[in-house]
Image (cartoon, rainbow, N blue to C red):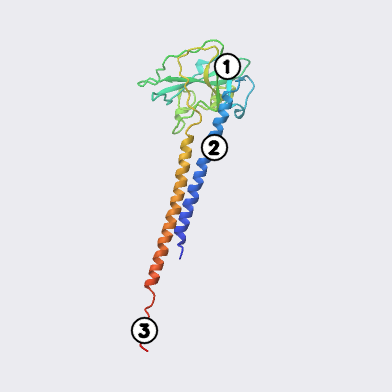
């Protein structure tokens, strides 16, 4: 049986790519599971106190934290296109001037947006004196899809995204390199904001589903290759029998 090189190579390439993509999805699922286990451990640990000393993001991300200071409402930024229960809204991000020095950004919570005029900000309360907030240390205040950077330009009250480093450069505030995703006040204080945060790790089942899909495609490619090879072999045998020379017999 003659093996056709180009089709065979194409099938091998398809199999190699789809198998590799399946392993990639499996690894992504394992990474998410490990991160979720890590987050669960942090949730059950005592909160770390945030002070003036800078803390590396890698040492504090997803940890429970607690900070004391005074909010700076004049520096507030509203992150647009943050829906909650299918309702458009903002995340309210505000610097907290820490007791003892230093600053940290706090994602205080979700606020509904006026559909007709997004610049008409709904009322909410901000404590005027020293407060103590609790939350989770995050790398940013959430990222939304954005075409270009115009929607996140400096000195805008309403933006699409807000980076800690860029905001520190814009304001001159020596910020901690993370954002506190606030879960509450100590003692409790009702400010009118919603703090029902999205789960940081989700869709693990989807990764496993994609893994099975990619491996299924690899199996299908293998099956198609074997089927095509079998048909080619059958055709060759049939043509070979049809081309056999006829034998004549003579009377002795």
Of helix, strand and loop, which one carries label 3?
loop
The label number, if any, that marks residue 30 in the structure image: 2
Q: Residue at x 50, y 47 (%)?
A: 19
Tell which of 172 and 12 is nearer to you.
12
112 left or right of 136?
left
Q: Residue at x 60, y 30 (%)?
A: 58
**Cβ atoms under marks 3 and 2 closer than 8 Å:** no
Q: Marks 3 and 2, Cα distance to the nearest angstrom?
A: 74 Å
14 left or right of 64?
left
Disc nearer the start of the sequence (3/1): 1
Residue 15, image x and y in percent? 48, 51
Q: Which residue is the site of mark 1?
A: 97
Local packing at callout 2 (Cα closer than 10 Å; few below 14, some 14-19, many 20+) is some
Of helix, strand and loop, which one carries label 2?
helix
Residue 218, image x and y in percent? 46, 49
Q: Which residue is the site of mark 3?
A: 249
């Amino acid at each position: 049986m003659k093996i056709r090189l180009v089709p065979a190579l194409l099938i091998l390439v398809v199999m190699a790519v789809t198998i590799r993509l399946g392993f990639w999805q499996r690894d992504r699922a394992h990474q998410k599971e490990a991160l979720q286990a890590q987050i669960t451990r942090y949730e059950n640990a005592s909160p770390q106190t945030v002070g003036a000393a800078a803390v590396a993001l890698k040492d504090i991300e997803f940890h429970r934290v607690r900070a004391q200071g005074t909010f700076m409402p004049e520096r507030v930024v509203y992150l647009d296109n943050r829906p909650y229960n299918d309702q458009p809204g903002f995340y309210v991000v505000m610097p907290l001037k820490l007791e003892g020095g230093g600053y940290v950004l706090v994602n205080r919570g979700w606020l509904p947006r006026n559909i007709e005029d997004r610049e008409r900000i709904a009322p909410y309360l901000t404590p005027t004196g020293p407060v103590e907030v609790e939350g989770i240390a995050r790398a940013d205040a959430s990222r939304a899809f954005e075409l270009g950077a115009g929607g996140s330009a400096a000195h805008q009250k309403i933006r699409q995204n807000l980076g800690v480093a860029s905001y520190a450069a814009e304001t001159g505030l020596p910020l901690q390199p993370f954002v506190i995703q606030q879960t509450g006040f100590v003692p409790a204080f009702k400010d009118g904001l919603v703090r029902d945060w999205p789960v940081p790790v989700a869709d693990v089942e989807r990764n496993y589903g994609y893994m099975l899909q990619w491996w299924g495609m690899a199996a299908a490619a293998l099956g198609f290759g074997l089927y095509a090879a079998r048909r080619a072999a059958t055709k060759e045998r049939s043509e070979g029998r049809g081309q056999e020379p006829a034998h004549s017999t003579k009377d002795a």
